[in-house]
Amino acid sequence: MNTSLQVDSPTPFRSALEARGVSRRQFVKFCGLMASTLALPHRYAHAISKAMEQVKRPVLVWLEFQDCTGNSESMLRSGSPNVGDIVIEMLSWEYHEVIMAGSGQHASDALERVVRECAGEYICVVEGSIPMAENGVYCTIGGRTALDIARQVCANAAVNIAIGACAWDGGIVSASPNPTGAVGLQEAVPGIKNLINLGGCPHNPVNTAAVLVHYLTFHELPALDQYRRPLFAYGNVIHDQCERRAHYDAGRYVQEWGDEGARKGWCLYKMGCKGPEATYNCPTVRWNEGTSWPVKAGHGCIACASHRFWDTKSPFYDRLPTVPGFGVDVKAEDIGWTATAVIAGATALQVGANMVRDRLKPPPADSDTHEPTNTSA
Amino acid sequence: MKHTQLTADAAPWRQPAPNQVRLYVWEWPIRISHWVMVLTIVSLSITGYYMHSPYFLAIGHTAYVMGTIRFVHLLSAFAFSFAILLRMVWFFFGNRWVRISQYIPTTRNRWKGMKAIAKFYTFVAWSPVAYIGHNPLAGAAYAVIYLMAIVEILTGFALYSQILGSHLLTVLIGWLPRLIDIQWLREIHFLIMFGFGMFFIHHLYTAILVSIEEHSGLMDSIFSGYKFVPQDHLKKELAEAPETK
C-alpha cells in the first residue's frame, strides 16, 4: 500500500464522501477494486484515488427507456463500501428519474438545461431499449418519444454508456417477436460517438463504476471488443473462470435439480449452463460485494451478457437450441437419432430386397467368365 | 497406366482373370485419408457425443474424464482435418478415378448415369451400371459428405477458437461466430455427426452390395488400391472420357 494515500489533506471530494458515511479506508478499497477490475497493476489504485479526488464532478444524465429499472436498482444496491455512493459523489447526477427529487416539468427542465449548457461535456447513461415501430410511440416520456430524447441527448454527450442488455441490443424487449420494434442504443442512434456497451441483465455495477473511473482517470474509454464492450469485463469465457470447472473436466455433473451432484456443487453443464459459450467477468467480480454469482448459487449461467441472449442462448435449461420447424419439445438429438434409425431401417429393407433380387436373377457366378453386366449405359 | 506389371509367379489371388486387368485405382493418399477419416469419425462421434451429453459420470477424486475426452476429440479433429486436406489436394492431383470430376457431376453423361444408378437402387433396373471410379450417384453423395466435413471442420475450429484464445485461430475463423451465433454453430456441428452416421450405414451397405454385384474386388481395393476390371470396360471408359494429363 502506498503510504502517500494516508497523509494528504482532505479534499472536498473526500469530505463529501465522509458526509455520506464512506470512510477513507472504504474509498481506498474502492480504488483497489477498480484497479483490479480494470486488470490494472496495483499501483494504479493510487493513480485512480488521486484522479478521483481532483475530478471536477462531471455532469451525468441517466436516461431510462423500455426497461425494468433493474440496472438502476443494481447500481443503487451495489453493496458496501457503497460503489453507488462513491460513483454518485464523484459525478454530478443531474437527471435520473428513479432517484431525482424533481418531477414533471422540473425534471424535463433539468435534462434540457444539461443538454443546453453542458453540450459535449456530460456523460450520458442509457438504460432500456428504444422502440422504433410506429415512430417510437411505445415509449414516451413527457410527451417525447424515447428515440427523440436519445437522439438529442446522446448526440451532445461526451460519452454514451449503454447499460444493461436492453440498451445494448434491445434485451428482452427486442426478443422475438419484438412487438415494439425495440433496438439497442447503437442501432437507434446510428453514428453515435464514444459509445460503450455494458451488456448483462442487469449490468454489473462494479464494471460500470470501473468504466466511469477509467474515463475520469485516463480521459478515454477502456479497450473495447467488436460489440464496443470493454475487454476487461467481456474478454473471458465464463467457463474458464468458473469455480465448478474442475468438476466439468473431471466428469462430475448435476443430472437433475436437487440430486446428489447439485448438493455437492458439481458442474451444471448438463442442466444447460451457458458458461462455455458466454463471456463476462461474473465469476471473478461477482455480485453484492463479491458474495456470489448464479453458478455459485447453483443455477446455470444463462449468458445474460451475450448478444441477443434471449433469442440465441435459449432454451436456458438445455445444451442446444431447438431445431426450427419441429415442436418446441423436440431436441436436435431426437431428430438425429430418428433420422439415423430411418436410414438403418431403409438399408435393412434394401438388403432384404437385394437378396430377393439375387435369387430371382443371380449375378454372374464366376469372375473368370465375368462380362460387364451393363456396358451400354 | 499402372495395371499389368504383375509377374506370372504372383500369388493366385492377385492374378486377374484372363479378360480382366488388375488396375491401380486408389492411390496411397486416397487409402490413407479414407482410413484416417473412418477412424477419426468414429472417435470424434464417440467423444463428441460425450461432450454434448456426458453419458457416464466420473468416479473418484483423480478423474479427468471430460478433460481426456476433449483431448482425444481435439487430437482426432486435427487428424481428420489433415485427412480431408490431403484428400482435397488429391481432387486436383490424383488419378482420373479420384478427380473432382468424379464427385461434382458436370457432364450430361454423369447426370444420366446418376439416374441409371438410382434405378438400380430403387429396384427399377435389374443390374448396376459398373464404373471403375465412383458411380455418379456415389460421387455426388461423397461431394455432400466432403461438404459436411468442411462445415464440421469450420464450426469445430470456430468453437475451439473461443476456448483457445489464440490470435491466429481467431483471425482465421473468428468471422464465423460473428455471422452465426455460437449456439447454432454447436447445433450444426452436432447434427452433422448424425449425417456421418447415416452415411456410414449406407456406405457400408452399398460397398458390400457393389462388391458382390460387380465382382470387382471393391472391398479389397480400399486396402490394396487395386480393382479387377474387365478389359473392354477399361478400354470403353478410357475412350469415352480420354484424360489429358
Image (cartoon, rainbow, N blue to C red):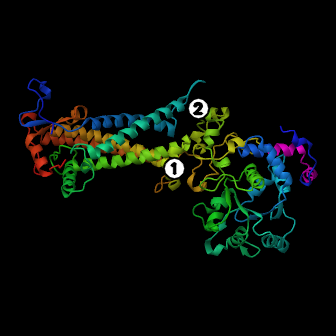
Amino acid type indicated by mark 2: Arg
**Element type where label 2 sits in the image:** loop
Count every numbered label the image shows and give the total. Answer: 2
Q: Residue at x 30, y 45 (%)?
A: A346
- Asked whether A231 or B15 is in front, the reply is A231
Amino acid on which the number 1 mark rests in the picture: Gly
Principal secondary structure, stretch drawn in magenta? helix
Q: Chain of mark 1?
A: B
In the image, A349 versus B67, the foreground residue is: B67
Answer whether residue A180 is visible to the viewer in this image. yes
Give the magenta part as a residue range.
A14-31
Give the chain letter at badge 2.
A
Q: State the residue position of label 1.
A: B174
**SS at circle 1:** loop
**Residue A68 image-quadrant placement:** bottom right
Q: Separation of disc 1 and disc 2 at Cα? A: 31 Å
* Image position, residue B127 (x, y; %): 15, 46
**Is residue B223 inside the magenta stretch?**
no
Query: x%, y% of residue B147?
Result: 36, 49
On the image, numbered disc 2 is attached to which residue? Answer: A252
> Where's the N terminus of chain B, which quadrant?
top left
- Label of residue A279 in the image: none
Please rate how many residues cluster around mark 1, counting C-alpha atoms within 10 Å: few if below 14, some from 14 to 19, many from 20.
some
